[in-house]
Image (tube, grey):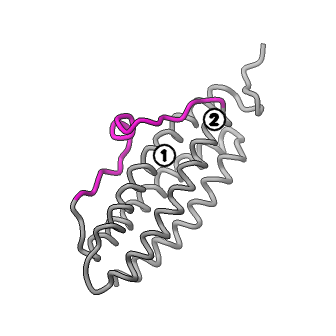
Amino acid sequence: MTDTNSIGLHEGSASQLAERLNVLLANYQIFYMNVRGYHWNVKGNDFFQLHEKFEEFYTDLLLKVDEVAERILTLGHQPVHAYSDYFRIASIDEDKGVHDGQACVRGVLQGYQQLIELQREILSLASDADDEGTAAQVGDYIREQEKTVWMLNAYLG
């Protein structure tokens, strides 16, 4: 009897990766809703610019939510899908009642920084498990989001 899953990864490693990916999924979901809220509620001189930018961000986040969930399924596990589970396991908190443009941008910046930190952890686990699929996925996310962090910091001055 083999201890590998259908894509040839050791089941223990796949299980550990799926668990961390579920944490990532929960963080993406909460961050997605935060950015959606910034998009809806932002006010101020930069409204038009930020409203459009936040839509760009949340559209990309929603795509990543689906990709992370599908990676969990590919590993042979089930993605969490209840907000009660998201709140229990995520490190990103809800950001309610924010409308000031600068505060919204700071919220986006902090969210991406938290995602990058978690994704680096997953990248390390995936590398140790010889899971090129997960490593490539989160590596791409990290690269994109590091550039976004740089741009958000530049915006904030």
Stretch of the chain drawn in magenta: 76-96
Residue 24: give its label.
Answer: 1
Residue 99: give its label.
Answer: none
Near-viewer residue (129 or 7): 7
Residue 48 lies in quadrant: bottom left
Question: Is 35 drawn above or below residue 100 in the view shown?
Answer: above
Q: Amino acid at mark 2?
A: Leu
Q: Residue furthest left?
A: 97
Residue named by callout 2: 73
Q: Is residue 63 magenta?
A: no
Q: Is residue 88 magenta?
A: yes
Residue 119: x percent and y percent? 53, 52
Q: Amino acid at mark 1?
A: Leu
Please tell me which residue is depicted at 57% across the width and 48% down the height of the picture. Answer: 66
Please tell me which residue is depicted at 58% across the width and 59% down the height of the picture. Answer: 141
How far, Cα to Cα, is label 2 from label 1?
A: 14 Å
Residue 74 lies in quadrant: top right
Residue 125 lies in quadrant: top right
Q: How crowded is the residue under tag 2: few (<14 C-alpha within 10 Å), some, or many (20+)?
A: few
Q: Which of the two discs, 2 and 1, labels the residue nearer the N terminus?
A: 1
Q: Secondary structure at mark 2?
A: helix
